Image: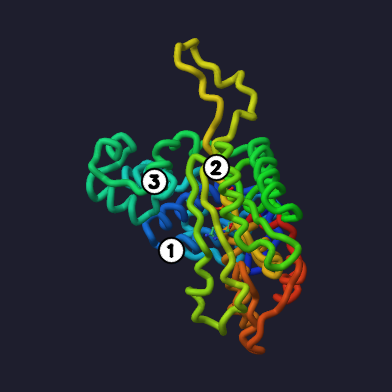
Amino acid sequence: QVNQAELLLFSVPAYACQRRTTLVNHNTALTDALSLLAENAELSEEEGRGVAFRRAAAVLKALPSVVTSMAQLEGLPCLGGHSLRVIRDVLENGASHEAETTKQSERYKALKVLTGIFGVGAKTADRWIREGIHTLQQLRESAQTLNRAQQAGLDHYDDLNQPVSQTEADAIGDIVQKAVACVLPGAQVTLTGGFRRGKDTGHDVDFLITHPEEGREVGLMPKIVSWLESRGFLLYQKTTRNSYLESMDGPGRPASNMDRFERCLSIFKLPDVEPQGTKEGPISAAPQKRWRAVRVDLVVSPISQFAFALLGWTGSKLFERELRRWAGHEKAMSLSSHALHDNTQSRYLRASSEEEIFAHLSLEYIPPSERNA
Ligand code: DCP
Ligand code: MG
């Protein structure tokens, strides 16, 4: 007698940008194990392995029901030998031995703690670990010089490692909205990143800012930053002019209006918006902190690039990577957060909405809530 459930074969297209991936995941046991191994590979600067695990996890996230046997995975894309071994282990033993061992390894734990500091990437964390620094305490006691970002990251470590709620994201949105309305009336603020995809928590809050009249957005970021700074909303900020022009040696030169992208990586000082009842500990003499630090990313884009910027900043990271891979491999096009270049026709394709970009790429439109690959 054959189990009916085991006859349920799944079918999904090869690229994540061809699939609808909601936040409902029927296979968290499998995807958690694969995501942990992906993260470990990324932290070890093994990008290829990281992507392979991410793609495998994304395929499982897109399945309409729970996987109960290896036979159901027949014909699914992106499941390499290593990922299949991990999946088999979870299905047969309830957990992946490799994922569990990794999670408990001193190196992984140290990499997690150290890269949990804003401004610290895998390279820096690896160097510190080789110098015997595995914990925040050891880092604080060491003679390591920290840059301004890392110092701010260390100062606000606990706040920045606590997920941002939707209520907090909304409160930040109100502040940014007010700042933008004051310094450039008519400019528009759009929430991007995970919150635009419908996630109810995030590691930061991402905003894209533009003005309906091309060129009016020039010089906007410093004004927003001054407004926020003068009112005490910023604990840290670093504004970088976009390096798009300098980095362009690929397909043709961009139009001259493409060097105007600016990005501000910041840490907001957000007055308390969540109910405080549960946070109350034993009565102490110390004055209560009435704010918390939140990572906020601000990006300014000219309206002509807005659709590309919106698509590029909405994520997920894997969805973005897959869009670019699809564009390059299947359409001979180059997609960025600025533009879409058709390499065959040697020209840029215009778009004023995300829908148009999907259409240029011959992809079915996938709304933000279904880009959670
Ligand atoms: N992004 C990008 N280039 C960068 C940084 C981000 O293209 N240098 C894009 C991909 C991300 C999106 O912007 O999906 C937002 O970046 P986040 O790191 O904030 O990712 P999410 O918002 O998706 O996740 P989280 O909820 O953890 O903030
Ligand atoms: Mg984000």
Q: First in sequence: mark 3 or mark 2?
A: 3
* Left/right of residue 134 with respect to residue 112 in the rendered view: left
Q: Label 1 crowding class (10 Å Cα cut-off): few <14, some 14-19, many 20+?
A: some
In percent of the image, x 54 and y 64: which residue is there?
79
| Residue 126 shows in the view | yes
In percent of the image, x 55 and y 36: which residue is there?
232
Q: Nearer the viewer, mark 2 or mark 1?
A: 2
Is 318 in front, or is 24?
Answer: 318
15 shown above or below 195: below
* Left/right of residue 291 with respect to residue 26 in the rendered view: left
**Disc 2 marks which amino acid?**
Glu
Q: Position of residue 145 (x, y in %)?
A: 28, 46
Q: First in sequence: mark 3 or mark 1?
A: 1
- Label 3, label 1: how many angstroms apart (C-alpha)? 23 Å
Q: Nearer the viewer, mark 3 or mark 1?
A: 3
The tag on residue 149 is: none
Report the label total. Answer: 3
Q: Which residue is mark 1?
A: 47
- Label 3, label 2: how many angstroms apart (C-alpha)? 19 Å
Is 248 in front, or is 260?
Answer: 260
Q: Quadrant of residue 144?
A: top left
**Disc 3 marks which amino acid?**
Gln
The coloring applied to the image is rainbow
Q: Which residue is mark 3?
A: 150
The tag on residue 229 is: 2
Q: First in sequence: mark 2 or mark 1?
A: 1
Q: Position of residue 152 (x, y in %)?
A: 42, 41
In percent of the image, x 64 and y 41: which residue is there?
172
Q: Position of residue 299 (x, y in %)?
A: 60, 57
